[in-house]
Image (cartoon, rainbow, N blue to C red):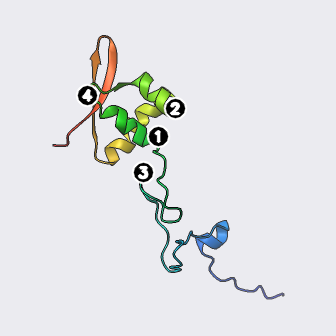
Amino acid sequence: MTDIPKSRPVSITEKSGKSRRRSARGDSDKVATRTGAGQPSPVTGLAKPPTKLDRILDLLSRKDGATLAELSVSTGWQPHSVRGALAGALKRKGHNVTSEKVDGERRYWITPAK
């Protein structure tokens, strides 16, 4: 019989072939973290453009809120995706999203947390 060599444990990054991003400052033991939208990038020093969730937050922060159609146009998302972002991502970030039908059209806005 032929001896089958025992294999060593393989890490997840070796299996996928992907490596972890390192920071540009040369800290090889620290993994780089993302900066928020509008914050200067540590590498280029330029502000990042707002994300689609940031656009939604801006529209929802207005006095009269925003309609689903306005949110869809602003993000380029389908209406069901916008509703999913309202119910999921924004709530996870701690925002209270309220809606009400005004003149036959549903409007959404952010209310302060209790």
Of helix, strand and loop, which one carries label 2? loop
Instruction: State the residue position of label 3.
Output: 38
Task: Name the mark nearer the viewer: 4 or 3.
Answer: 3
Task: Name the mark nearer the viewer: 3 or 1.
Answer: 3
Instruction: State the residue position of label 1.
Output: 52
How far apart, in angstroms, are the residues tagged by discs 2 and 1?
A: 9 Å
Do the residues bearing badges 2 and 1 touch, measured as CB atoms within 8 Å? yes
How far apart, in angstroms, are the residues tagged by discs 4 and 3?
A: 23 Å
Identify the mark at residue 63; answer none if there is no mark. 4
Residue type at tag 3 = Gly
Task: Name the mark nearer the viewer: 2 or 1.
Answer: 1
Of helix, strand and loop, which one carries label 1? helix
Q: In this rendering, is residue 100 above or below 16?
A: above
Find residue 57 and report its horizontal and vertical position in percent.
Answer: 36, 38
Residue type at tag 1 = Lys
Q: Residue at x 40, y 36 (%)?
A: 56
Q: In this rendering, is residue 21 above or below 48?
A: below
| The C terminus, quarter of image | top left
- Sequence-wise, the earlier of marks 2 and 1 is 1
Q: Nearer the viewer, residue 76 or 17?
A: 76
Q: In this rendering, is residue 72 above or below 40?
A: above
- Sequence-wise, the earlier of marks 4 and 3 is 3
Q: Residue at x 49, y 34 (%)?
A: 75
Residue type at tag 4 = Lys
How far apart, in angstroms, are the residues tagged by discs 1 and 4?
A: 20 Å
Q: Nearer the viewer, residue 24 or 52?
A: 24
Find residue 95 and report its horizontal and vertical position in percent.
Answer: 28, 42
Q: Nearer the viewer, residue 38 or 95?
A: 38
- Sequence-wise, the earlier of marks 2 and 4 is 4
